[in-house]
Image (cartoon, rainbow, N blue to C red):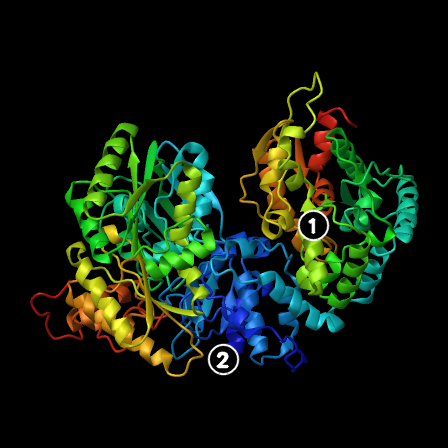
Amino acid sequence: MTVGALIADLRCAIGADRVRADPFEMTLYDRDASTMRGSCAAVCLPASTAEVSAVLRTCRSHDWPFVARGSGTGLAGGAVPSGPKPPVVVVTTRMNRVLDVDVDNRLAWVEPGVINLDLSRAVAEHGLFFAPDPSSQQSCSVGGNVANNSGGPHCLLYGVTNAHIAALDVVLADGELVRLGGLDAEPDGLDLRGCFVGSEGTMGIATRICVRLTEKPRSVSTLLADFTDMGNAARAVSAVISAGIVPAALEMMDKTIIGVVEAYVQAGLPTDAEALLLVELDGLQGGVRVESAAVSAVLSGHGARSVRVAADDTERAVWWKARKSAFGAVARIAPNYYLHDCVVPRSVLVDVLGEVNAIARAEGLLVGNVFHAGDGNLHPLIVFDRREPGVEAKVHEAGRRIIEACVRAGGSLSGEHGIGLEKRDAMSLVFTEADMAAQKCLRDAFDPEGRCNPDKVLPSGTAGCGELASVPAGAWI
Amino acid sequence: MAVTGRNLLGLDPDELSCCVSCGLCLSTCPTFRVSGEEAKSPRGRIAAMRLVSEGAAVTESFLEVISSCVMCRACETACPSSVHFGSLMEDTRASLAATTVPWWQTLAYKTLERPRLLRLLTGMGAVAQRLHLIPPALESRLSLPRLAVRQEPLTPTGSDVWLFTGCVMDAWQRPVHAAVIAVLSAMGFGVALPGAGAACCGALHSHAGLTSRAVTLAGRVMSAFPGDAPVLVDSAGCGAQLRDYGRLVGTDEAARFSARVHDVHEWLAARADLLPPVKAGAGPLTVAVQDPCHLRHVQKCHLPVRKVLSPYASVVELDDDGVCCGAGGAYSALRPEMARAIRQAKLSAIDAAAPDVVASANPGCSLWLAGGGAKVEHPMVLVAQRAGLV
């Protein structure tokens, strides 16, 4: 089958203006917010479940792979069209309606292209919000959040996306529509919904998502503490949690990041500090007041030079804007970044941060750290200019060593950005062949012909069901 | 189809590489919001500029990527890396202008530079409207308001401040200028009016990439405002252009002129204690503020409008994070379909806020929203009315 025939059939299936095959326009879909690139055979812009199903049926009849894409803000190349056969990109941005809000049960059915922040805005009048809040929440889609099981600063208290998805209507690779999960408190059978959330587009395309909404906290207190020593800041993080307090968010920024975000937001952040901690507490007024005072004491006790409390919502919003714009703002230093997403036990934060900085120094690279300290989710951000000869090799070498260091410290590859293309080949650092074979088995059950976002998550050549003679003891199954 | 294989853009590679493709701009872009297409997003547009700068051919699809932009510049406000999207887009358009700007657009812009001709055409248009001679489609595409057959001339009241009067604004919305003069006079400030040289600020020329013409017009405007009194502007688009003369013309004189320019609301907000009192017996009024993009994202002084209005009305916000209304200077006339789709979202936000009236400080936005059925007034007209001055 040729690409031409595929495109013609896609156009028949959903209309000529919803299928783009102009080489120039297709190039714009070659990448997401990561640095990886691929190439695609066509771009489809379906506007309904029926159209997604028609696209996938057409792909099936041509035996053609496809990749789902929301806003394209992913950081691990999950939506990059890649593989030996350039896939069809299925863009969900036109499926952006909030279909139904059930205020009493705090549920909402939404289409996958709804922007995360738009969802919270749409339900704000009922005193509700959608808790997962990735830094890209003003642009990223709920479908993308589902695919990556996205987190965000406030997931420390509220849990990541998986905790906020009740049910999913999914179009499988053969075009069939199935419902995973359900609105019952405890749906029958296996938790296939749980399998799908975080599957990075390898199990089908969710076209209707039932999200759980959260009541907006009655009271919020946000603290900003600055430290002249990174180690003290990291120790303060553990001390807050050890004191029995789980803040809604507990974020850290290092000196490099403070400088660039301050240049953007001009919030009066202390640019001479080695580290900043942003701590948010929410709940009932009395509890927040007590916890706020307790956290403030812990931070001061661990060497905070000053602890400020946001005076009002405006100041709080500026601090959060500073935190959430960090990745984009590093372009003030250099035009490219390579961002990691390892999770390490909180107790080893100090050591791992030291190691990350030492690795970058050894390669002669600049690294910034801005991350979810409360749950040990590091985001070392290597800043570089691709035009500098040989720099990419150094960046990848440093990246590899950072991942290895985190895994050695008992960490995992990804907290919230996903494995995608970027960390695919590092999977073997954490998982054995048997682990990956089991994952491949599960994936094959959803997509037996391997057309759903091929080339992602599992290294090529991963053995499938029954291909391993026996399962060794201790495999992560 | 390749229009040309030559790299025409000549953009600064450092500026282009400043975009790290994070996508934080996407949701602020009106054309992305209605189309969902990467090619109609700021990130996609920069990627496209980069491709052409690196040697890709200028194709029809590239021209569409460039011409579909409203130039609201909301992406600049959203961009953590502070990419100067507006300059990139203007420079790109400037390098393509010879092949992309149609003759009728150039001719229409020439009319804006000739106040007497514009007034004559406006008078003829007003008569034609009354005789129902203008096809409704054309009237809607140009966002034509009910034109006045004859307009009362404006009278200068002193020399404390200049008022920039402009082209379409003076021909179609002169009562706004009258309201500004009335309010300023009530506060004790005498207003000087420029001569014919200040007819057109050249903003539309700049947006279309007709840069050298824009520079010529800038020269004319600057010489129409001698001395060093502040130059107040009541049109957000014109104000943004006048404030950009320093960069556009690139001389010290132009930079000094730009520094004298203030949005009228910004200037008044700094003197809010002198604002005239609300007239006795004025009933309650709820006003929704629509922020013109050239006030919010370019001049970054949209908040003063609220400060100036707040003594006179209850001010409510639209729940759409200030996204563009689709007017975009000439955009609504050049790309009516896209502009209408963008406007629809704005009208829904207005419906949700349910105000008595919408305040818009830019003639393009107010005409465009009124064309969609919204009740719109310039903030200064509301102030003058509530103070009983007009």
Are labels 2 and 1 assigned to the same chain? Answer: no
Can residue A308 be seen here? The reply is yes
**Amino acid type indicated by mark 2:** Thr
Secondary structure of the residue carrying tag 1 is helix
Q: Is residue B63 above or below residue A225?
A: below
Q: Residue at x 76, y 59 (%)?
A: B218
The C terminus of chain B: image quadrant: top right
* Image quadrant in which you'd find residue B219: bottom right
**Amino acid type indicated by mark 1:** Arg
Q: Residue at x 41, y 78 (%)?
A: A85
> The numbered mark 2 sits on a residue in which chain?
A
Camera-near label (2 vs 1) is 1
Q: Residue A1: x, y in percent? A: 47, 79
The residue pinned by badge 1 equals B260
> The numbered mark 1 sits on a residue in which chain?
B
In space, the residues marked 2 and 1 are separated at their CA atoms by: 63 Å
Q: Residue A341: x, y in percent? A: 29, 62
The residue pinned by badge 2 equals A2
Q: Nearer the viewer, residue B50 or B114?
A: B114
Secondary structure of the residue carrying tag 2 is loop
* Left or right side of B52 for A227: left
Report the label total.
Answer: 2
Q: Residue B191: x, y in percent? A: 79, 39
Q: Nearer the viewer, residue A296 or A115?
A: A296
Q: Nearer the viewer, residue A33 or A329?
A: A329
Q: Residue at x 37, y 39 (%)?
A: A310
Q: Nearer the viewer, residue A184 or B220?
A: B220
* Left or right side of A88 for A233: left
Q: Residue A28: x, y in percent? A: 52, 69
Can residue A412 be seen here? The reply is no
